Image (cartoon, grey):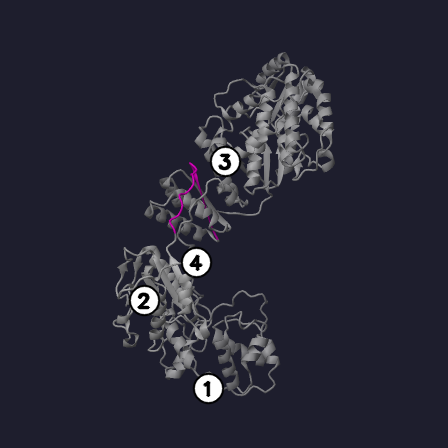
Amino acid sequence: MEVISEALQVARADAAELAYVECHGTGTHLGDPIEVAALDQAIRANSANELPPHHCLIGSIKGNIGHLDTVAGLAGLIKTALCLQQKEIPATLHFSRPNPQIHIESTPFKVTDRCQPWPADRPLLAGVSAFGFGGTNAHLILARAPQPLPTGPMREWHCLPLSAADEIALERQATALADWIEQHPDIALADIGYTLQVGRSALPWRAIALAGDRAEAIAAFRGMRAIQSRPSAGTLWIFPGQGAQYPGMAAAHYDAEPLFRDALDEVLDQLPKTADLNSIRALLLDGNYSAGDDTAIVQPALFSYQVALGRTLLALGMTPSSLLGHSLGELSAACLADVFQLREAAELVCMRGTLMAETEKGSMAILQTDVGNVQVLLDERYPQLDLAVVNSPTCCVVGGPPASVDRLLADAFASNWQPRRLRTSHAFHTRMMNPVLERFRRLLQGLSPAAPRWPLLSGQDGQWLSPERATDPEYWVQQLRDPVRFDAAWKRISPFAHTLLEVGPPGGLLTFAHDAGCRGATMMTLSGDRHQHQPARQARFLHTLLRLWQQGEALDWGAFNQHWLPRRKVSLPPYPFARERHWLPSSLPLLQAVQQGQVDSLPVFSPARPQTNTSAPLNQAGIQLQARPRLDTPYTAPASELEREMTSIWQSLLFIAEIGRHDDFFALGGNSILALRLCQQVRSLGWVLTPQQVFQQRDIASLCANLSVPLAEPEPTSTVAVDLAPEDTESLLQLLDGADLK
């Protein structure tokens, strides 16, 4: 009574509000009347009004599943929670009339004998009792959980990751999920994605889907392609240089991804006051921006976009194995690697763009031929031009005065080098940059660079940047002037199975990597190109995140969802575990046959099992022996007559044709029951062998070495070996309960 009263008082509930109480229900003549009497006293003591008969229903789950000992209260708790959820009170099974000693007619209770809806005039409030020995009593007051809060906003595209321990389980999971989505049209796709993201472990086999609606999700799950995530050489983040930009390149992510929006705003806030922030923002976010290719605008905008993308990836828990930048992109990589702090890098990039814009106008042209041909042509006929970029072994860029570039284009056409003039106002990475190098050097000398946080690959020569070189101002001065040698960088990484991730607007770097021989790399880009609409660009971003996760990258789904909460977890189909039957050893039914005296007439049958070699030997009962399983110990033949006798006994018990003297009894399929039978057969031959010896010594050589009594003549015995079908398991266990195994 006291524990029930205390529960009502802690819950601040009037007992009259209770519509149902899940009783402990001992089912005994003594226990049930005591429980109901105590409940009656507690309910009346904690009710403001007199309670009429049949006011509160009572029942017990023990009528459904019997006594559960220490978990009886837990079963009642689960049942009552389901009653509150479904707003129904089920019948107490097998109940016909109450124990007359309860005197239930004088109480406010009625045993529920049929399934009925929750009383409309009563709140969703119920009690649960669980009583044990020695006063270990508990009573809970349960109320139905409040309705979930409205969910947060939803992305236009939904990320749906799946993983499993093997490919078959993944296929089953995808099929089950497709069926489930069809059957639950009222469940938001965003909540399904959220549950898959935060409610499931990431297992080795992975599949991904990006869907805009339910039909796309169902189709994707039915046609999912699974891959096994494997360790790789890591993800190399590569950053394109000037020329990759286009108006509105950041707009899709800025509008749709709060995490990126915050990162971009933070970078833009760090630009110096001298920067034309309005024009920079317009180039990033306005697809109609048409102010040209002013280097002083383009370089800060491209830098801001790349660093914001990188910071978004870092916030999502992804990290690079190394970084590589093309021209301006190398400064973006250095900023993310903490060589320069954000404010310093922003100032450096703005000054770099301004200084380059101040140089004499120049032109640049791309040539599809190897660097040797280009260098010969420049040396012999165009000494006023410089080799500016080598993107791959067969893609070079030259730069210099416009008139000289015009003449070179004509020669290149004649040589079938597929020349093309680049959209640029200056000849970057040529001698035309020399006039601004000293001013750039002075700015660098006032900064405080640090050793890179992650390995940086030099865009000048393809070497890994040491801390000394990365922090040397002269390196960054020459980086502005010297040619970009991405051919050397590709050569450095091509032997390794990297994932190449282009961070920024597509600038052709992945194509150059492929041409340079990085064909074993997985190539991805975060951004859509200038010809795509904004939704497609955002879809590319999300799909790349999913692909990185599928490849084995960590992805912090909590950070991914932080701006889209609250979301609901939903009850999706469970994991499709592999259902395998593990039968008891095949000789166990012999115990039943021996006890019932049916040894001679017991039929031999074989349930479905792996096919065996028809030429395999048979034992004395005519049962085909199995091949020796793979063991850690190599096969060693018995070394004595005693060991051969012991081997014969093992073969009759284990049904294995070839057993070595050092093979482990239990590794061959032995168990405690077979160990007893082994001891019985050995004793029948005059030896003394105990189960303890079998468990400790475990192999034929050890057992025979400890037998000291000469082998006696074997007594005639008859054995029949049969397999145990699953349906025989219950009868076998009953037999073993009463079997005398001495």
Mark 3: amino acid: Pro
* Marks 1/2: CA–CA distance: 62 Å
Q: Is residue 79 visible?
A: no
Q: Along the polypeptide, which appears first: circle 4 or circle 2?
A: 2
* Residue bearing mark 4: 578
* Residue bearing mark 2: 59
User: Quarter holding the N terminus?
Assistant: bottom left
Which label lies toward us, 4 or 2?
Answer: 2
Q: Position of residue 9 (x, y in %)?
A: 41, 61
Mark 1: amino acid: Pro
Q: Is residue 397 left or right of residue 287?
A: right
Q: Along the polypeptide, which appears first: circle 1 or circle 3?
A: 3
Which label lies toward us, 1 or 4?
Answer: 4
* Marks 2/3: CA–CA distance: 52 Å
Closer-to-camera residue (654/183): 183
Q: Residue at x 47, y 33 (%)?
A: 256
Secondary structure, mark 1, is loop
* Residue bearing mark 3: 258
